[in-house]
Image (tube, helix red, strand yellow):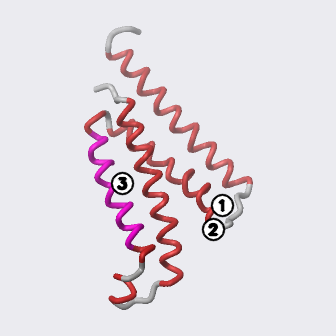
Amino acid sequence: MATKLWAMGVILFCTALTSTAQIFYKFAAEKLSFNILSIITNVNLLMGMLLYAVGGILLILSFRGGEVSVLYPIIATSYIWVSFLSIYFLGEVMNPYKWAGVFIIMAGIVLIGYGSKKADIEGAGVI
C-alpha cells in the first residue's frame, strides 16, 4: 500500500496538536495541586487533554492512508515542534546539541520517506 500524502499531512498536524498539548501541560503543572477541584478547574490541563484526544483520533484515522512504518516515524517531528514552542512560549534556550538533534530527526524522516518511495517503485517492478 502506497502511503498517501494526506495521511502524512494529518500525522504532521497531529504532532503539532500533541506538542501544543505538552506546552499546556507545562503551564498546568505550575498551578497543579493534587486535589480533584484543582484538577477539574485547571484549564491548561483540560486543554492539553483535549488536544491529546483530538491528536489520538487523527492519528488513528491517518493510519488508513498508508503504512505504519512510514507514518509513525513522522511523530518524531513532535520533538521539533516542542523545541520551537518551548523557545517561544517558555523562553527556553536551544544549545548546539539540541539543534543537531532537530536536524538529525528531520534527516531521518526524509530518509524514511525516500526509502518508502523507493520500495513502492521496486514493488511495482519499475526498478
Specify whether 71 is left or right of 113.
left
30 or 125: nearer the eye?
Answer: 30
Q: Is residue 71 above or below residue 125?
A: below
The quadrant of the picture occupied by the C terminus is top left
Identify the residue under disc 2: 90
Residue range corresponding to the magenta coloring:
46-63
Amino acid type at image mark 2? Leu
Q: Is residue 39 above or below residue 11?
A: below
Identify the residue under disc 3: 55
Amino acid type at image mark 1? Ile
Mark 1–mark 2 Cα distance, whole angstroms, equals 6 Å
Does label 3 or label 1 sit earlier along the sequence? 3
Identify the residue under disc 1: 87
Disc number placed over residue 36 in the picture, else none: none
Dominant secondary structure, magenta: helix
Which percent across, then down, holds residue 107?
58, 37
57 or 105: nearer the eye?
Answer: 57
Q: Is residue 53 above or below residue 28?
A: above
Which percent across, then down, holds residue 53?
32, 60
Mark 3–mark 2 Cα distance, whole angstroms, equals 22 Å
Q: Are marks 1 and 2 in contact (CB under 8 Å)?
A: yes
* Circle 1 SS class: helix
Mark 3–mark 1 Cα distance, whole angstroms, equals 22 Å
Which percent across, then down, holds residue 6?
37, 33
Q: Are marks 3 and 1 in contact (CB under 8 Å)?
A: no
Question: Which residue: 52% across, 66% down?
Answer: 23
Q: Please tell me whether residue 47 belongs to the stretch shown in magenta.
A: yes
Question: Which residue: 52% across, 72% down?
Answer: 26
Q: Quadrant of residue 49?
A: bottom left
Q: Quadrant of residue 115?
A: top left
Which percent across, then down, holds residue 18?
43, 57
